[in-house]
Amino acid sequence: MNNNNNIITTISLGVPQKQNYGIMATVLLCKILGIKLDIPSYLFINAISTYKDKVSLLPEFLSHLNDANAVPQHVIKDTESIKYTLSILANLSNNGYILEKKVKKIKCDCGRIDAKDDTETRYNFIKNGKCIFCGSEVKNQESNELVFQMPKNITLSYQMIPNRHSKNFQNLQNALSGREILISKSRDTGLRYDEYNIDVDFNNYLLMNSVPCDNHIILASANILQHMAMFNGISQVLYGNEKHNIFIMVSYLTGEPHIEKIKNVNDLQLFLLNSINKFDKVDFDNGFITMLNKPSKHTYVNQLIDWYYKPESISIDQLESFYLRIFLNNNKQQFL
């Protein structure tokens, strides 16, 4: 399988309130794999929000990524893609995939809980019948809403890397098949279609589908598998079965990285890439910084970074073995 008309992207990433090195690691990995595969790389950014002012934080977020030389080839912001999103919403509506219906749902005063009453999506936000964010009582209501009709059978081809997530992903996809997904919200979401406020997550799925391609490699973490199953179903509606999605499950990095001990950009990049490993959730490997700071390692660190930035034209068929060998290796310190 050749690499023509293929792309690699992040998920649509929310602008963080403060520097987030876990996000930076994923964005850097997107850039590096794009170089190794010799295909375009994209960073999708979600800045539309009415909970917090993310738009004003966007320049600083991009500046931090740029300082770490981690920005992929292309950056697509939802704030600059509203016209595209509205046209896709209109197209989906005209083709019967978006419907206006009376929906029984549960909601709180702040809008964090705003879901169909047959879903468990937001129930972890409820304690003793109240919203854990605003403390208001969660109430039942019936109102006119927009729903997205998932295909009866989601058959779009996909690949999970590593493969151990495939069964869980398929179960999630089967559960979504044929369902009506609530895509409007009572609160102001920052995106309005006709008289309805459109769910931010649904806007993200459309944004991620905004670049036509044959093979779409998406970097995500295992804790958002349900979102990826939703994305796959929406991809099928937009592209038929002419698209193939490849999901790379990246470690969800936790803990506080000791960035103050890192001396240069090369060391920072290698530290971030090294922290990604075979585990779904893992702390930053701060012990690796000590090894990076050894004078004897400086030459080899620079050589290794040079290797990461050297295109190899790895084919899509070789992607899984390459990723498992380089990034999920149990003993990556052997490379130093």
Image (cartoon, rainbow, N blue to C red):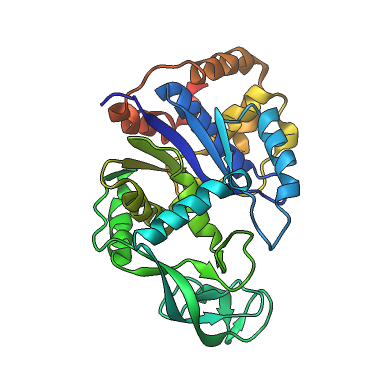
| Residue 304 in the image, given as x and y percentages of width and height | 53, 18
| Camera-nearest residue between 192 and 267 | 192
Q: Is residue 145 left or right of residue 162?
A: right
| On screen, residue 185 above or below 237 | below
At 46% from the left and 70% from the top, the residue drawn is: 146
- Residue 71 visible to the viewer: yes
| Residue 303 in the image, given as x and y percentages of width and height | 55, 13
| Camera-nearest residue between 237 and 280 | 237
| Camera-nearest residue between 73 and 258 | 73
Position of the N terminus, as image quadrant, is top left
Q: Is residue 60 left or right of residue 90?
A: right
Rendered image quadrant of residue 45: top right
| On screen, residue 137 above or below 93 | below
| Residue 192 in the image, given as x and y percentages of width and height | 59, 62
| On screen, residue 88 above or below 248 | below
Rendered image quadrant of residue 262: top right
At 55% from the left and 31% from the top, the residue drawn is: 74
- Residue 18 visible to the viewer: no
| Residue 160 in the image, given as x and y percentages of width and height | 33, 44
